Image (cartoon, rainbow, N blue to C red):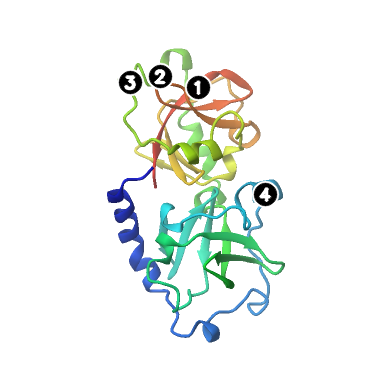
Amino acid sequence: MQTQQEQHRQQTAQRSAWEDRRAHNWKTEHRDWQQRGGYNGYRIPEERYRGYFGPSHAFRIYSYPVVVVGGYPRFQYGGFYFNVVDPWPEYWPNNWYANDDVYVDYSGDGYYLYNRRYPRDRIAISVNVGDVAQNGAWGSAWQDHRASNWQSEHRDWQERGGYNGYRIPEDRYRGYFGPDHAFRISTYPVSTVGGFPRFQYGGFSFSVVDPWPEYWSNDWYDNDDMYIDYSGDGYYLYNRRYPRDRVAITVYAG
């Protein structure tokens, strides 16, 4: 679980993003998607929606990265970006994003953020798969990190001196990781950080420190079922098509 210091750091970092979007009179300031002319954003695939969204999948929003884009808070959850286009009600507590259970739901006319403490309120949000992924940078991020001879180029965490990165809390691990939780990696945001591909999944960021095998297909990130597992000495990315290979990855909390 997160330490109190980590929780305080994340809450402090998000405070300004949320305070600037507090309503003065939410009843007159918010608009649902019907009033906005209809929802025209990205739509979450049904199988992904069932696994992460709806009333059965509540979360504390401060646990996930939040930035301000175009004047609106944008948070990441379940592999997607969510732009909060409505203000939040002035009668919600100042620290609702730290203490209240919220969930994302589709209500017939668009996506909304709900707060279980105030079940009648719904905050209009739009979904994005991530600007980097949409602009086609997936191919370049991965092609630059392909091995020439993977057997001689990759190193497991034991060979790297041990894993010293962030460790995923056990309850979160059971819900999103291990062989039973496969995903297609191209549906998640990716960037290149420090020369290594970094993707987001399950509320965490993963830096791919190993190259990927040269004998994997060029479009493995589009078509192969991947999963993340902890194998005793560290975290690895696995490809079900090549079950003997494991690619060393580092976990980041944000």
Q: Are marks 2 and 1 in contact (CB under 8 Å)?
A: yes
Q: Nearer the viewer, mark 2 or mark 4?
A: 4
For the residues labelled 3 and 1, the Cα–Cα distance comes to: 14 Å
Which residue is identified by label 1? 246
For the residues labelled 4 and 1, the Cα–Cα distance comes to: 28 Å
Give the amino acid at mark 3.
Arg
**Secondary structure type for disc 1:** strand
Residue at point 63% right, 58% down?
42
Residue 54 percent across, percent down from the top left: 63, 57
Query: Which of the pair 93/136 is nearer the observer?
Result: 93
Q: Which disc is residue 156 wearing?
A: 2
Mark with earlier residue (4, 1): 4
Mark with earlier residue (2, 1): 2
Residue 30 percent across, percent down from the top left: 55, 79
Give the amino acid at mark 1.
Arg
- 220 to the left or right of 160: right
Give the amino acid at mark 2.
Asp
For the residues labelled 2 and 3, the Cα–Cα distance comes to: 6 Å
Q: Nearer the viewer, mark 4 or mark 1?
A: 4
**Secondary structure type for disc 2:** loop
Q: Which disc is residue 160 wearing?
A: 3
Quadrant of the rendering where the N terminus is positioned = top left
**Secondary structure type for disc 3:** loop
Crowding around mark 4 (Cα neighbors within 10 Å: few <14, some 14 to 19, many 20+) is few
